[in-house]
Image: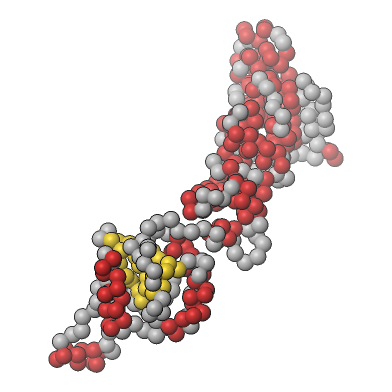
């Protein structure tokens, strides 16, 4: 066992401070001990926070009812025949003279490097689930590469709480098991959301390394674009389109959206074009000879044209729709051309404000 430091012994908080015991299983266990060994709760409230965490870790694995804990702590096998009250009394009297490291070694058989330091960062916080301490101990003794990344990152994060550590438990993406990432996650939900983004961008850009993703995340608060968007702008769509191989039809993505928008005198918002171009179900196509853009959407019947945009945001006419239909139908793309009413029913349009050419589809000016 290693030598003591200021936080490894029970000691007393400086200035005579008293730190309350959190409600829940820790308070219940401490109250149970205090009922047999009066004064233990008062000593706990005044103990140094590092020692308290080690003691709570021991309590989390049932040390007050386990004679093996006292056998390892004292070296005496007499505890194997002790009564239940004697075991509780023995824990109370023995634990207060043990160091934090000795408590962990007696409770978990080993105290891996970095475990106590991580517990100290919890200060007076007690985890909601007693199994938390065993799970964390398991990370620090594991040979699994992901657990080793978790342990390394946890040791380097300045401020820790149960949510950040639970986030580390939940993550399986190596690029996010970093001190910077864990310091920004305030819940398992936020960690898993970032992980889903990392998985998506990996699938779209297999060339990205763990370091690339980690660096992008670390720089994610700099500049205007979030880290996920920055990586997506480096990615290219992988799904096939019926227009592939057609020399006059170009996919619109992050790399060419701004240029095409300027050529047409329209606003092609890169941040809106980019996600749909990568989605696998929606995209925009530039028909260069005609200098118009049409949108494709995948349905159960196949790909279909759902919007048409002309230069300077001019609305598409029935003639424009038919022109696009004639171009894409040989490629197996659906493009319904709206029919006009019978002449004698045109009065309906005049009386009630008319209808757009593309009432069935979205042949509007929305580039989203």
**What residue is rendered at 26% in x and 69% in y?**
329
In the figure, 323 relative to 301: above or below?
below
Residue 234 % position (x, y): 55, 59
**What residue is rendered at 25% in x and 73% in y?**
336
Q: Name the image quarter holding the C terminus.
A: bottom left
In the rendered view, does 84 fall on the left or right side of 95?
A: left
In the rendered view, does 123 fall on the left or right side of 217?
A: right
Work out whether residue 7 or residue 287 is closer to the camera in this orientation and state it: 287
In the rendered view, does 218 fall on the left or right side of 313?
A: right
In the figure, 267 relative to 228: above or below?
below
**What residue is rendered at 66% in x and 57% in y?**
219
Q: Is residue 33 visible?
A: no
Q: How many marks?
A: 0
Q: Name the image quarter holding the N terminus.
A: top right
**What residue is rendered at 63% in x and 58% in y?**
220
Residue 211 % position (x, y): 63, 48
């Amino acid at each position: 066992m290693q030598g003591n430091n200021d936080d490894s012994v029970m000691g007393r908080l400086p200035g005579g401070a008293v730190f309350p015991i959190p409600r829940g299983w820790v308070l219940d266990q401490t109250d149970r001990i205090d009922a047999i060994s009066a004064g233990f709760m008062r000593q706990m409230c005044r103990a140094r926070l590092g020692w308290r965490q080690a003691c709570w870790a021991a309590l989390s694995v049932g040390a007050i009812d386990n004679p093996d804990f006292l056998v390892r702590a004292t070296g005496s096998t007499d505890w194997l025949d002790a009564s239940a009250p004697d075991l509780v009394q023995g824990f109370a009297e023995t634990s207060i003279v043990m160091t934090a490291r000795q408590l962990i070694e007696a409770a978990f058989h080993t105290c891996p490097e970095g475990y106590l330091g991580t517990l100290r960062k919890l200060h007076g916080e007690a985890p909601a689930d007693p199994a938390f301490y065993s799970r964390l101990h398991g990370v620090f003794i594991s040979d699994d590469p992901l657990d080793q990344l978790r342990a390394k990152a946890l040791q380097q994060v300045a401020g820790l709480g149960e949510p950040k550590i639970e986030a580390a438990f939940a993550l399986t993406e190596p690029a996010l098991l970093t001190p910077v990432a864990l310091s920004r996650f305030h819940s398992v939900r936020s960690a898993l959301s970032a992980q889903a983004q990392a998985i998506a961008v990996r699938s779209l850009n297999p060339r990205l390394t763990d370091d690339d993703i980690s660096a992008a995340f670390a720089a994610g608060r700099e500049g205007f674009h979030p880290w996920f968007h920055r990586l997506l702008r480096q990615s290219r769509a992988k799904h096939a389109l019926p227009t592939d191989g057609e020399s006059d039809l170009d996919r619109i993505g992050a790399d060419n959206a701004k240029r095409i928008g300027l050529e047409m005198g329209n606003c092609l918002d890169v941040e809106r074009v980019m996600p749909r171009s990568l989605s696998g179900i929606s995209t925009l196509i530039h028909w260069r000879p005609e200098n118009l853009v049409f949108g494709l959407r995948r349905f159960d019947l196949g790909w279909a044209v759902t919007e048409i945009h002309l230069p300077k945001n001019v609305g598409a006419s029935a003639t424009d729709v038919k022109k696009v239909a004639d171009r894409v139908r040989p490629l197996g793309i659906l493009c319904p051309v709206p029919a006009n009413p019978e002449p004698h029913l045109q009065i309906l349009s005049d009386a009630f404000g008319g209808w757009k050419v593309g009432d069935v589809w979205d042949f509007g000016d929305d580039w989203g």
